[in-house]
Amino acid sequence: GRYEPKAPTSAEALVGSLSSSGGGGVLLDVGAGLGFFSLAAAARGFPVIAYEWNGGDELLEASVAHNGFGELVDVRVVRIGGRGEEYCRAIASAETAARRTLAGPRGRGARARGVDIDHELLGVSDAALERTRERLAEAAATRVDTTVDAGVDGYARDDEGERDDGVRRLRSLLRSDPAKRTRGSHPLPSVRVPTPRVPVHLTRESISHGGDSPFTCEIAHEARISSVDDELGVGQKGVGPHVTVAAMRIGFGDGWERHVLEGARRLLTTAPPPVVLVELSPRLNPGPTDERIATHAALDWLWSLGYTDVAHSGEICEERWRNVTRHADTRGGGGGADHALKQPTWCHASRADLPALAYGAGTEPESVLLHHESAADES
């Protein structure tokens, strides 16, 4: 990849991308928080649809009103998530784990101190959770195991019965000691990073609907979890969204970003926003699926859709820069103060760099900014 000077910030980069899009369209801010990105866009005159919940919406609405952006920022109190069996399995697993934790010493101790920790729960009934588990068990009993080319949830077509060796080679390569990748003073032949292939479990129902049949998830329905596609009215038959999305930000940074992307699959394939900003942290979601493999698959899928201008900012970018400067110092390439290398805020990524984003993301989110190739053609 290549590097840029230590500017701009994520908000500046996103709003700047809106400015260069030629006008028209809205910023879709999913997980808007206190509204830093939404307010930055509104301050430049761009309309925003901001999704926030769990009480954060009240602070966001107050901030929007205080700044006089009521006509530009549409705050919607809707919990945005994913869609399908895999997402349902993930939230059922998370709900079960949260209930166990909160019923244990940690939960009792927190409540004794007057700490409100029930926000970690979906707020669904025991009966709904039990019925969802039964539905998932039924789906597991009737599914067909397959491996497929990269997709956010793997809904592609392949008849192979086992996981592709490329995934095992990739995982082995990423876990291996760099010192072991050389033979004496000569590096081993480079290993081509394969297109990620992930194990997928298609139910008979989803197969009959071409892999895009929404899985009936009762706890998601009871918790009133929606998806980007459902909110914008993007249909299965190529029906476009109700609004033109000039940029989309997925700002959770809590490990659920891949599922939100899956919930925007139809938007991304039928009317792709020119710019997508994702706060990536797959390690924070210890679900039933290896999120790092699945996140690599999601990033590769976005690349295949035309999001081939990728930049990232955060710990991974800083680590890449340390490696570059360490190599320069080792070779005596410092060149004095006048030629000092400036640490970047943003690192550009090629397709071969995508695994590092998925596997290297730690507890702090990595901001990943993706520009669609159509935006470059128009500029």
Image (spheres, rainbow, N blue to C red):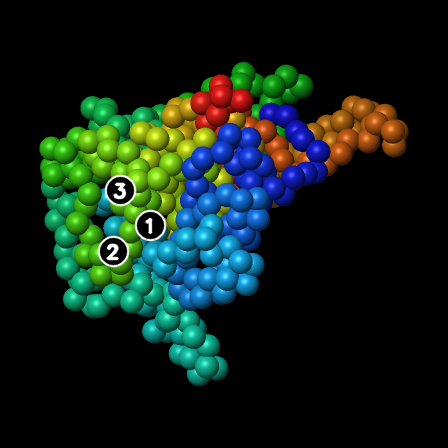
Residue at 42% in and 44% down: 28
For residue 65, above or below residue 82: below
The residue carrying mark 1 is: 81
Can residue 254 be seen by looking at this rendering? no
- Along the viewing direction, whichever of 303 and 189 lies nearer the viewer: 303
Residue 46 spot, x, y in % from top left = 50, 43
Residue 213 spot, x, y in % from top left = 18, 39
Q: Amino acid at mark 3?
A: Gly
Residue 233 circle label = 3
Residue 38 spot, x, y in % from top left = 51, 50
- SS state under label 3: loop
The residue carrying mark 2 is: 220
Closer to the eye: label 2 or 3: 3
Q: Amino acid at mark 1?
A: Gly
- Along the viewing direction, whichever of 71 and 221 lies nearer the viewer: 71
- SS state under label 2: helix
